[in-house]
Amino acid sequence: MPTPGAAYAQTVAAGLEVAIPYTAAPGDGTQPSKVCVHLANVTASALSRSGKAVQFSGVAGSRLSLTGTKEIDIPAMWPANCPFRIPPDTSKPAVAIGFLNEQITTDSQGRPTRDKNRTPTYDPSATGGFTNAVRPVAFGDETTEVTIGHAAVPAPSRHPLPGSAGLDHRR
């Protein structure tokens, strides 16, 4: 049943494989792309309700690989805003970085919430935001950023929309 002042977004996929940069795979199963994100059973959702903190959820079993070599195995449940680096070995140059189960809260204007140093920060009282199952950034001749499994909800409006007079927006 619809709830006035509420918004819900969800992304679901049985499986995804995102290659950066994309290169068609030959029939022998090799991975010609530099970075590849392999995801299974992806679910990302966001829920906003008037007067309540935004709620996020995300699940996806996955692995991250570099030119066909598995670099990171990721369990289906990982912590929010979990950073990753490919390769994980910091003595080698980074080929890609990113976040798993990224959860970003937003202010009433839809901008990411920030701390006193203007760094994006999670605000547990925010009523809007977005989540990404995975957001990799691959480095190379050009930097490529990809958002995978995205769900976003705006903060509920404190002002009724035209034509909605009489609806209770406080629930």
Image (cartoon, rainbow, N blue to C red):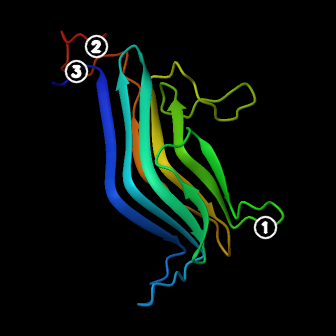
SS assignment at label 3: loop
Q: Residue shown at 39%/63% (left/top)?
A: 16
Q: Residue at x 54, y 83 (%)?
A: 32
In the image, is residue 166 above or below residue 68?
A: above
Residue 124 appears at what percent x and percent y? 54, 21
Q: How much space separates mark 2 and mark 3, taking CA atoms?
A: 9 Å
The tag earlier along the polypeptide, 1 or 3, is: 3
Q: Between marks 1 and 3, how big is the CA–CA gap?
A: 50 Å
- Spot the residue most to the bottom: 27
Q: Nearer the viewer, mark 1 or mark 2?
A: 1
Image mark for residue 93: 1
Mark 2 element type: loop
- Residue depth check, mark 1 versus mark 3: number of the one nearer the observer: 1
Q: Quadrant of the C terminus?
A: top left
Classify residue 80 as left or right of residue 45.
right
3 sits to left or right of 143: left
Could you tell me if the residues under marks 1 and 3 are in contact, i.e. CB atoms within 8 Å? no
Q: Quadrant of the image for the N terminus?
A: top left
Give the residue pinned by disc 3: 3
Amino acid type of the residue that numbered disc 1 sits on in the rendered structure: Pro
- Judge depth for marks 2 and 3 and give the one in front: 3
Q: Nearer the viewer, residue 100 or 53?
A: 100
Lateral position of residue 76 relative to residue 138, left or right: left
Residue 143 picture location, percent across and down: 64, 66
State the residue lying farthest toward the right: 91
Q: Is 102 rendered above or below residue 64?
A: above
Is disc 1 placed on a helix, strand or loop?
loop
Report the amino acid beneath label 2: His
State the residue in front, 164 or 84. 84
Residue type at mark 3: give it: Thr
Toward which corner of the image does residue 21 lie, by quadrant? bottom right
Mark 1 vs mark 2, CA separation in Å: 51 Å
